[in-house]
């Protein structure tokens, strides 16, 4: 019996491998994030500019992107605004060493970021934020699949009911007159109770 339980446990769906994209013009920041998250088994991609980030996202399904606020060609809020339009399901986290309230508000409102993390970050904090963001993404996917399943089942229900009604009518058509009489008496008796 234990072997059966162990076999079933080993056949459980494997943990998904998430793809993370880090976008920052500072290579040392990209290297630090890469070193920090590689041991978790994530597929890590890095981009030194918004343009590189968009190119990667156009070719690879990215689950979560962390982008610096200050970059030469486009700031993080602008990057996330465009990324949200093309890849709305990708989780977006803004990373900045500057306390620019207006830019952060733009990132939140226009880019619909998941979180705002200040540099220098605490490793435990950023690890936890990304873990929670990915868990939330998994739950959102499950919710969507369940809603789709529920909708399909709801749409199939009338068809199933119609098939059952036809099946009952066919069985009733095969009854002898005496069986019909007994059935009518039984149905009438239930109606009186």
Image (spheres, rainbow, N blue to C red):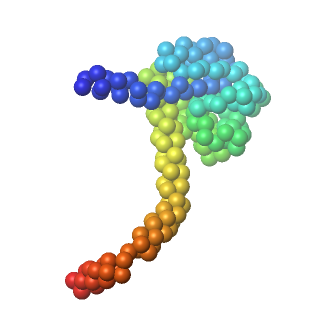
Residue 190 at x, y percent in the picture: 25, 80
Query: Residue 166 in the image: x percent, y percent?
Result: 48, 69
Between 38 and 153, the one lying in front of the other is 153
Image quadrant occupied by the C terminus: bottom left
Residue 105 seen by the camera: no
What number of labels is visible? Answer: 0
Left/right placement of residue 32 relative to residue 132 reads: right
Tell whether 149 sits left or right of 78: left
> Which quadrant does the N terminus fall into?
top left
Q: Is residue 76 above or below residue 111?
A: above
Residue depicted at 49% across the width and 37% down the height? 138
Residue 78 shown left or right of residue 116 in the figure = right
Relative placement, left or right, of 25 versus 190 is right
Residue 30 spot, x, y in % from top left = 62, 17
Q: Is residue 57 above or below residue 190?
A: above
Q: Nearest the camera: 190 or 49?
A: 190
Q: Quadrant of residue 73?
A: top right
Q: Residue at x 74, y 25 (%)?
A: 52
Residue 126 visible, this angle: yes
* Outermost residue, left side: 193
- For the point 53% across and 30% down, the residue is 117
Q: Position of residue 99 (x, y in %)?
A: 58, 33
Camera-nearest residue between 103 and 132: 132
């Amino acid at each position: 019996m234990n072997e059966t339980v162990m076999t079933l446990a080993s056949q459980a769906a494997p943990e998904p491998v998430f793809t993370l994209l880090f976008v920052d013009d500072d290579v040392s920041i990209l290297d630090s994030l890469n070193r920090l998250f590689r041991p978790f088994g994530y597929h890590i991609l890095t981009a030194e500019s918004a343009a590189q980030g968009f190119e990667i996202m156009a070719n690879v399904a990215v689950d979560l992107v962390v982008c610096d606020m200050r970059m030469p060609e486009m700031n993080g809020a602008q990057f996330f605004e465009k990324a949200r339009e093309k890849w709305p399901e990708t989780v977006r986290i803004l990373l900045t060493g500057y306390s620019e309230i207006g830019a952060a508000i733009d990132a939140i409102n226009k880019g619909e970021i998941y979180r705002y993390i200040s540099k220098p970050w605490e490793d435990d904090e950023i690890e936890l934020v990304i873990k929670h963001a990915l868990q939330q993404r998994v739950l959102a996917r499950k919710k969507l699949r369940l809603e789709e399943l529920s909708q399909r089942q709801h749409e199939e229900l009338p068809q199933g009911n119609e098939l059952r009604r036809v099946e009952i009518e066919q069985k009733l058509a095969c009854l002898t007159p005496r069986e019909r009489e007994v059935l009518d008496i039984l149905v009438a008796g239930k109606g009186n109770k």
